[in-house]
Image (spheres, helix red, strand yellow):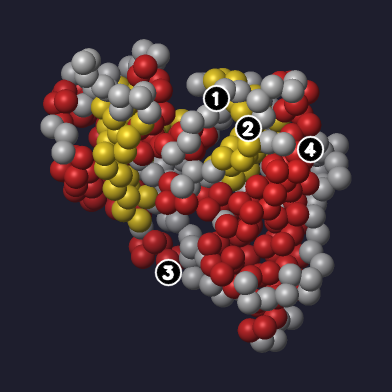
């Protein structure tokens, strides 16, 4: 029996230091051997957001330890690793450089292939860690830094159908949490507060909901939340605003996903219809329920990563590395960090108010 490839994955694009090892099993499916993630929440909490220089310093301090722990937990001898896959972008350049240089050093010392991975492609492929997915599929990528619909034709083949013209949905969650007095990172706590509130209490705007195709906008929603928080008088008002915000996001994503479904069908016809939702915000259970309901209505198959793999992690980077390894897609050791690396490199940059639809 031929040896199945083992890939070492490294992720340091923002404020998680992560290392993982995965192996392809006898059925040709990825198997996570270890997946260690070290969060920096306590470091950045007092600043209300990620401080790039502090994040990079923490990566430097921890990456050796995290890598050793991942290798030990995997039970794999480092010499048996077949390739090293490292996030090269997008992200904070000072953070990307830490993992990139660490990964290159390991690859060079082992004389094994080096694979530069787009962080977003890691998210795009992450549901393959627990589900069998055939190309092509429709992807909704929702996180703190990105919100976009993509037609995924194959590995490295992406066509952007729509994107945010201003802020990412995860950023809207985090800013709303901050306005409600929730400590960083507060986005995930919005869903918890929302369970205690009345989602009909505040009528919040849904920017470009009926225009702009499947492009998204969240800046106006954030402004409305800011205005309302100035008049909040008690905890009940906080819960009601959180519930109203959560419901508004669900409605925006429901409507825009429905538009994206039509665009996907225009490209793909009536073939297999799969809708993959990935990224940190994909861990939001109410959003999962809303989009699963839409898929049931529209005869699409809904696929999400496991909740523990929605956020930044190295297992998804190792998986992207495995997919590239099988196609002999390797990179030189001088591959640079790319802080603004798009999945669809032919797509125009689209951000800012004043865009005409």
Residue at the (82%, 47%) spot, across then down? 208
Q: Position of residue 249 (x, y in %)?
A: 70, 56
User: Looking at the image, which residue sits at the far bottom?
Assistant: 234
Q: Name the residue beneath numbered marker 4.
A: 259
Q: In the rendered image, is residue 13 in sight?
A: yes
Alpha carbons under labels 1 and 4: distance apart: 22 Å
Residue at the (16%, 34%) spot, across then down? 76
Residue at the (16%, 38%) spot, across then down? 75
Q: Name the residue beneath numbered marker 2.
A: 274
State left or right for residue 182 relative to residue 66.
right
Tell which circle, 3 or 1, labels the residue nearer the N-terminal end. Answer: 3
Please name whichever residue, 166 or 277, is drawn nearer the observer in this view of the structure: 277
Q: Position of residue 185 (x, y in %)?
A: 48, 63
The answer to whether the residues at label 1 and label 2 have Cβ atoms under 8 Å apart is yes
Alpha carbons under labels 1 and 2: distance apart: 8 Å
Q: In the rendered image, is residue 90 in sight?
A: no
Q: Where on the picture, by quarter, is residue 87?
A: top left
């Amino acid at each position: 029996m031929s040896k199945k490839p083992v890939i070492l994955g490294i992720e340091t694009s923002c404020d998680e230091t992560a290392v993982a090892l995965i192996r392809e099993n006898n059925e040709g499916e990825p198997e996570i051997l270890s997946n260690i993630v070290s969060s920096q929440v306590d470091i950045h909490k007092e600043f209300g957001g990620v401080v790039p220089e502090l994040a990079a310093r923490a990566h430097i301090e921890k990456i050796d330890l995290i890598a050793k722990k991942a290798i030990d937990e995997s039970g794999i001898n480092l010499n048996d690793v077949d390739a090293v896959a490292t996030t090269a972008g997008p992200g904070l350049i000072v953070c990307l450089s830490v993992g990139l240089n660490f990964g290159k050093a390991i690859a060079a010392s082992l004389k094994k292939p080096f694979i530069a991975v787009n962080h977003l492609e890691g998210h795009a492929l992450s549901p393959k860690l627990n589900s069998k997915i055939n190309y092509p599929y429709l992807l909704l990528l929702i996180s703190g830094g990105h919100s976009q619909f993509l037609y995924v034709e194959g590995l490295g083949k992406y066509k952007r159908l729509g994107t945010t013209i201003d802020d990412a949905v995860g950023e809207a969650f985090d800013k709303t949490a901050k306005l409600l007095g929730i400590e960083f990172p507060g986005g995930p706590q919005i869903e918890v507060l929302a369970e205690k509130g009345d989602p009909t209490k505040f009528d919040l705007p849904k920017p470009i909901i009926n225009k702009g195709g499947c492009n998204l906008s969240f800046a106006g929603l954030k402004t409305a939340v800011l205005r309302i928080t100035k008049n909040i008088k008690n905890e009940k008002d906080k819960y009601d605003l959180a519930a109203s915000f959560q419901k508004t996001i669900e409605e925006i994503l429901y409507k825009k996903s429905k538009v994206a479904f039509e665009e996907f069908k225009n490209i793909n016809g009536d073939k297999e219809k799969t809708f993959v939702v990935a990224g940190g915000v994909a861990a939001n259970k109410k959003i999962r329920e809303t989009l699963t309901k839409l898929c049931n209505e529209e005869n699409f198959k809904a696929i999400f990563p496991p909740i523990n793999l929605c956020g930044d992690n190295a297992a998804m980077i190792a998986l992207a590395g495995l997919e590239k390894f099988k196609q002999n897609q390797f990179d030189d050791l001088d591959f640079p960090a790319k802080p603004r690396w798009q999945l669809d490199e032919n797509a125009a940059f689209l951000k800012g108010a004043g865009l005409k639809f």
